[in-house]
Amino acid sequence: MDIILFVYGLSFFILGVLVLFVRTKESAIFFARKIWLLGVFALLHAFVEWVFLYMYLYPEYEPLLSPIKFILLLLSYLFLFEFSRFIVRESFKEESSKLHFLHTLYAAPVIYIISLSSLLTLILIHPSLDDAIAAIRYTYGFFGSLFLGIGLYYYGESLKKSEYVERLKIYFKVPGIAFICYALLAGIAVSPTHYFPGNIINTAWFLDTIGIPVQFFRALCALVITICSIKALQIFSDETHLKMIKSIKQIKRFSSDVSHELKTPLTAMKGEIEVALKEPRSQEEYQKILYSNLEEVDTLQSIVKNLLMLTYLEKESLKNKFTQQNLDDVLLKAIEDLIIVGSQKNIIFEMTELESVTVIGDEILLKTVFSNLIENAIKYSPYHTTIFISLTAANHMAHFRIEDEGNGIDEEKLNLIFERFYRADDSRSKQIKGFGLGLSIVQQIVDVHDGNITVKNRKPQGLTVEVTLPLAP
């Protein structure tokens, strides 16, 4: 028994140390940013079991150590309960989820009023210390572990698809099952108490029936949770490391690209001004040079504007300003602004489908997505062609599609077109002006709206771009 209690406590201690000392705040995954709550629970619970071990070895100290065990147990389960609350709300936040009611139930004002009322009622019925410890296990231990297990099991499905999320799913599902088992073992099989079910199903009954202390199975659950947490934390660490390397590379490339893009118009302006100052010129010549410089200034302004837009999109507080938007109205406004531009090349806009669609977002940013994609389609479409546009709703998502009749893009370059300053000049027209920032901006706007964008070549020719965005609840 003493070995089991020691290993049980050690498993939670290792889990707590790993969670609290591994840097996960940089992770984009919500779970990683809240896992410190699990770490605090694990450390406190390790001390609970070691206090219990000491009481088992030295029964004469039980009156002194029981209040300490009560306080540590309450604190540990409160941290576990809070962690489970966050995971449940995150896992079932979509209204389409069958367990969405848990998202509402686990709002802090609701669930804490219910749980505290339950805890105080049980303590008032039987105010002894042992019964109070059982009440804590019933209220926060059982429900905290049970719903944390359910939340973890489904949590992976709520994550945005990425290369590491598929690997993470198994490390959510397995500890999810382990926490459900732990809920039954630690929240039901408590020390013998005066009220149901502790007066029937308890640690003494478990030992008599199974022949093995319940703490042994709790220790197994703790070991499974610890091993899976180690694997998950390793993935979080790898994810953060890869993001840092990628960010450094992007910064270096971005600095190089910005320098190049700004250098070209500045060099042109400097050259023209130097030539103009070498000898007296007529008013018409000076005007010609000034008009040329004005074009270069417009180019610089456009580059700076786009760079500021990219910086704005990286702000974490941006989503707090989102409101409900009629996406069909936003799309029609974007088309209206660009009809004249399209008519200059005798391009026809054909609206194949248009449904009334509502999303949560920023009107200006959403219009920027449509405007940039439509403008791109106009730029790369030959004269006297058609651009096909549709907006529909299906499977809780808005689907925007735009197709042109241009030359398309080489297949090996399709995955590069969203990079900053990249322009697929080989397969599109080299004479078309641009800075390679439009699609990068589009992708970041779509990302910040929790959407997705795909590009593929269209048969017999042309390009198809599709944007999907979550519908408003």
Image (tube, rainbow, N blue to C red):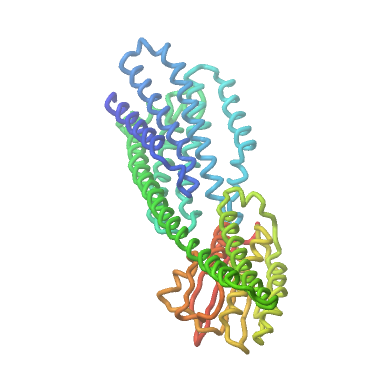
Q: Measured from the top left, where is residue 423 in percent x and y?
A: 49, 72
Q: Is residue 203 visible?
A: yes
Can the viewer see residue 169? no
Where is residue 81? Give x, y as percent.
51, 35
Residue pushed farthest bottom? 384
Compare residues 255 and 165 and report the one nearer the observer.
Answer: 255
Residue at point 45% right, 40% down? Answer: 35
In the picture as drawn, the residue positioned furthest to the front comes out as: 279
Residue 57 in the image: state x and y as whole percent.
Answer: 30, 17
Residues 239 and 3: in front is 239
* Above or below 453: residue 227: above
User: Where's residue 51, x and y in %?
Assistant: 37, 20
The answer to whether 66 is drawn above or below residue 240 in the figure is above
User: In the current view of this chain or complex, which residue is farthest to the top?
Assistant: 60
Quadrant of the rendered structure where residue 216 is?
top left
What residue is drawn where x is 55% and y is 50%?
A: 92
Question: Residue 307 versus residue 226: which sits nearer the camera?
Answer: 307
Of residues 88 and 205, the one nearer the viewer is: 88
137 versus 466 height, above or below? above
Considering only vertical position in the picture, is 191 above or below 385?
above
Residue at (42% x, 24% y) in the render = 191
State which quarter of the image contains the N terminus. top left
Quarter of the image for residue 438 reads: bottom right
Count of numbered marks:
0
Figure quadrant of the C terminus = bottom right
